[in-house]
Image (tube, grey):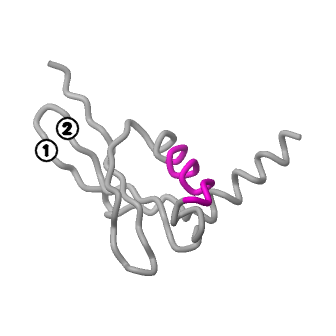
Amino acid sequence: MIDLDLNLYAIYDYKVEVFQSIFTVENDVTAERMFVDVAMDKNTMIGRHPKDFALVRLGRVSTVTGKLYTEEPSPKFLGSAYSYLADAEDSLVADE
């Protein structure tokens, strides 16, 4: 059996001061893409209030043993929804 570690992520809500929507994916790029997709959707709370939310990496988890490994420092803040949206807009402008 192959032991595949997945990174463990959460969305941090600055207003409520809680970590929520914990999820696992293979790497930061995939997590960032998912986070940007949600942030771009104005039908979501993150999309309506992008300055209130950040993507964080909490650590990783083994899919075979279930063992959790925390980040050092934990958690690792990867960026706010607002900053990701600004980067996405800059990228779109550069592509034109």
Q: Residue 37: where, in percent of width, then height?
A: 57, 48
Q: Which residue is mark 2?
A: 62
Q: Is residue 65 above or below residue 73?
A: above
- Look at the numbered disc 1 and give the secondary structure of its residue: loop
Q: How many marks?
A: 2
Question: Where's residue 10, x and y in %?
Answer: 36, 58
Amino acid at dot 1: Lys
Of residues 9 and 59, the one nearer the viewer is 9
Left or right, 67 with respect to 92, comes to left
Q: Position of residue 96 (x, y in %)?
A: 89, 40
Q: Are marks 1 and 2 in contact (CB under 8 Å)?
A: yes
Residue assigned mark 1: 67
| Residue 21, image quadrant | bottom left
Q: Which mark is residue 93?
A: none
The magenta span reads 32-43
Residue sitting at the far front = 43
Residue plotted at (76% across, 47% down): 91
**Residue type marked 2:** Ser
